[in-house]
């Protein structure tokens, strides 16, 4: 069963130790960089700091996600232009450790994260956007 946990000093090392397969490394920043970026975002007193989540299966860390909340989308934003969305959660960093890939954990984790975002942890939103490397 997939569980989302806040990243604390108790599980920080677990998240840093998660790795992508070597052929995937150019698509996503290392988790240590993402956590440092999230910290800088917090100390900059952003109204809506990045949401960082550790993904667990049972008691084992298997993935990481980082999400940004946009209270008001810019007028030229795709979602605003196409759908009239005013606010959005942007799920822009997501990874499953290479040891756990190919087992359906990415899909289960993404659904769990979407379920969490539907609780509007930082405010009401019209949409959830998920970044996909191409």
Image (cartoon, helix red, strand yellow):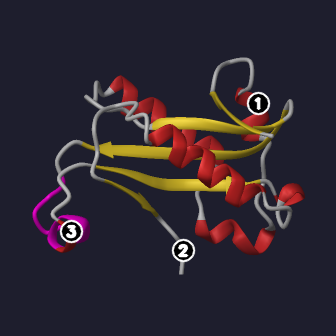
- Would you name the residue on which mark 1 appears? 13
Residue at the image position 52 percent from the left and 48 percent from the top:
114
> Disc 3 or 2, which lies upstream in sequence?
3
Residue at the image position 84 percent from the left and 67 percent from the top:
102
| Stretch of the chain drawn in magenta | 73-81
Residue 101 spot, x, y in % from top left: 82, 62
User: Which of these two is toward me, 84 or 46?
Assistant: 84
Q: What is the spatial separation of the Cα atoms under label 3 and label 1, in whole angstroms?
A: 40 Å
Quadrant position of residue 41: top left
Magenta span contains residue 118: no
> Disc 3 or 1, which lies upstream in sequence?
1
Residue 108 spot, x, y in % from top left: 70, 53
> Disc 1 or 2, which lies upstream in sequence?
1
Left/right placement of residue 83 relative to residue 88 reads left
Quadrant position of residue 45: top left
Secondary element at tag 2: loop
Camera-near label (3 vs 1) is: 3
Q: Residue 133 — which label?
A: 2
- Would you name the residue on which mark 3 appears? 83
Could you classify mark 2 by the number of other residues whose Cα lies within 10 Å: few (under 14), some (14-19), or many (20 or more)?
few
Q: What is the spatial separation of the Cα atoms under label 1 and label 2, in whole angstroms?
A: 26 Å
Residue 128 spot, x, y in % from top left: 39, 55
């Amino acid at each position: 069963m997939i569980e989302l946990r806040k990243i604390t000093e108790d599980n920080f090392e677990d998240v840093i130790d998660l790795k992508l397969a070597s052929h995937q490394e150019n698509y996503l920043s290392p988790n240590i960089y993402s956590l440092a970026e999230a910290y800088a975002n917090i100390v900059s007193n952003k109204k809506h700091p990045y949401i960082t989540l550790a993904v667990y299966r049972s008691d084992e860390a298997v993935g990481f996600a980082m999400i940004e909340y946009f209270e008001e989308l810019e007028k030229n934003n795709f979602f605003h232009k196409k759908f009239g969305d005013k606010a959005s959660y942007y799920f822009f960093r997501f990874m499953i450790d290479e040891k756990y890939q190919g087992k359906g954990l990415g899909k289960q984790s993404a659904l769990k994260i979407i379920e969490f975002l539907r609780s509007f942890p930082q405010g009401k939103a019209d949409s959830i956007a998920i970044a996909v490397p191409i």
